[in-house]
Image (cartoon, coloured by chain):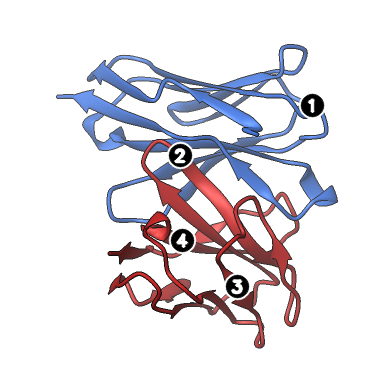
Chain colours: A blue, B red
Amino acid sequence: QQQVKQSPQSLIVQKGGISIINCAYENTAFDYFPWYQQFPGKGPALLIAIRPDVSEKKEGRFTISFNKSAKQFSLHIMDSQPGDSATYFCAASKGNRDDKIIFGKGTRLHILP
Amino acid sequence: NAGVTQTPKFRVLKTGQSMTLLCAQDMNHEYMYWYRQDPGMGLRLIHYSVGEGTTAKGEVPDGYNVSRLKKQNFLLGLESAAPSQTSVYFCASSYRRGTGELFFGEGSRLTVL
């Protein structure tokens, strides 16, 4: 049972464009939604995270948009750069009511120079 | 500043052999996790620990055992390796339940022939 569905599986964007990765969840008990970035040969690293009490969170060129009623959240990368080429994972947890963080299947992003 | 260290980084096993992956963290984190990463499957939680002497099952625990005898170490064991266990294994640690940032190691690539 996949609890966090992520799309697309892969994405190619021109330099300077906007990259958009979407995730959907089913369990309404989830209340913490992080995004992780992974470069080849490395472990994932936290990029940005959001709680459902806000609809949007921005950190530099990275923005999370959250739609609680639709149980969806997305990552937007503005002015995408070749250095952003990586695999991105969305994730979800029940906050401090659970010990586990469940990940989506990942999106491989490639930014064309 | 080592963070999370995994050993070994690469290993080739024959079907039926046993081995142990070691994860060590120097951040005094209570929570530790073992994930496996497979193409198109994302990160799947194998086992986790909420403190020294404790372990719990994740999404895909079958065929694996774990131990947390010391707070800084989390061991993942394969008693009788199978080709289906060919994967990249990531250890992670966190300072807070559920909402804490996961700090990942660089991974251990295991091939079972």
Residue at (70, 72) in percent of width and height? B30
User: Are dots 2 and 4 in contact, CB under 8 Å?
Assistant: no
Q: Which mark is residue B65?
A: 3
Report the quarter where the C terminus of chain A lies: top left
Q: Residues within 10 Å of mark 3 (few under 14, many from 20)?
A: some
Q: Residues within 10 Å of mark 2 (few under 14, many from 20)?
A: few
**Mark 1 belongs to which subunit?**
A
User: Measured along the vertical axis of the image, is residue A38 above or below residue B108?
Assistant: above
Q: Report which residue position mark 2 lands on.
A: B41
- Quadrant of residue A82 in the image? top left
Total count of labels: 4
Q: Which mark is residue B90?
A: 4
**Mark 4 belongs to which subunit?**
B
- What is the three-letter code of the residue carrying label 2? Met
User: Measured along the vertical axis of the image, is residue B39 above or below residue B19?
Assistant: above
Residue at (59, 58) in percent of width and height? B46
- What is the three-letter code of the residue carrying label 1? Asp
